[in-house]
Amino acid sequence: MLSGTMTFISATILLLLVIDPFGAVPLFLAALGQVDPKRRVGVVIRECLIALLVLLTFLVCGESLLELLQISQTSLGIAGGIILFMIALHMIFPSTKGLFGDAPQGEPFIVPLAIPLIAGPSAIATVLLMVSRWPEQSMKWAAAVCTAALLSTLILASSQSIAKFMGERGLMAIERLMGLILTVLAVQMFVDGVREFIHSL
């Protein structure tokens, strides 16, 4: 999926795997536990919009940022593969504190829901990788980011209903399945980066 030509559908699927909205359902429920039930959907939409703006900012400014920091596509590919692999391992073998540790009390704002739960390092690295490898298709990537964000918003806004329907075991099974798929993609990204590095020598 990360080598050759990436399509709009494959980019959207990759971003959904990285964001992992089903895996984020328990974390969202925990973070929103002290929020008025009438405000929860609004908070989810607000946080998802903030995350979308962050990802689109990196999409638009990604090339300039990489040039400013003098980061090559090869380095980004290898680093992105490592980050995705670490996220995938957390999805398969979750810790007792969750993926991002303890969260601040009260109504969440930006942290930890928008950043880093949705627009986390893996999602940002994925966006940067796409725009650096195929800069001429930036509109396609923007559409994929918006689509993935919209689907994630719908899933997370329905987190209460999803949790009741699927139960804790069902959510854990889906998160582990997505983690396994993401592991394969992470390894492929890392291998592509190493192959490019070897060819550049």
Image (cartoon, rainbow, N blue to C red):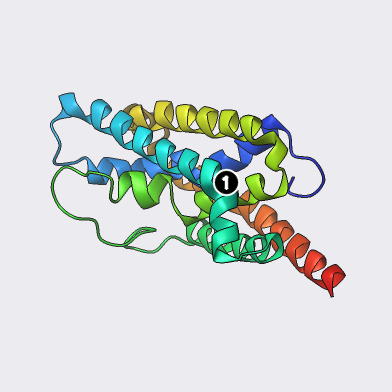
Residue 136 against residue 67 in the figure, above or below: above
In this view of the protein, can residue 67 be seen by the observer? yes
Where is residue 75, by image quadrant?
bottom right
What is the x, y in percent for residue 72? 67, 63
Residue that appears at 15% across and 36% down: 35
Image label count: 1
Q: Secondary structure at mark 1?
A: helix
List x then y, in percent, for residue 177: 58, 47
Q: Position of residue 51 (x, y in %)?
A: 39, 40
Residue at the spot x=79%, y=49% of the render?
A: 3
The residue positioned 58% from the left and 58% from the top of the image is 66
Compared with residue 27, is residue 93 higher up or lower down, i.e. above or below?
below
Quick one: quadrant of the C terminus? bottom right
Say few, some or many: other residues with alpha carbon within 10 Å of mark 1 (under 14 / 14 to 19 / 20 or more): many
On the picture, is 165 further left or further right than 197?
left
Q: Which residue is mark 1?
A: 127
Judge by depth and name the residue closer to the eye, 151 or 65. 65
At label 1, the amino acid type is Val
48 and 133: which one is in front? 133
**In the rendered image, is residue 177 in sight?**
no
Identify the residue shown where x is 45% and y is 39%.
21
Residue 1, by quadrant, is top right
Q: Nearer the viewer, residue 174 or 73?
A: 73
Q: In the image, is 95 to the left or to the right of 187?
A: left
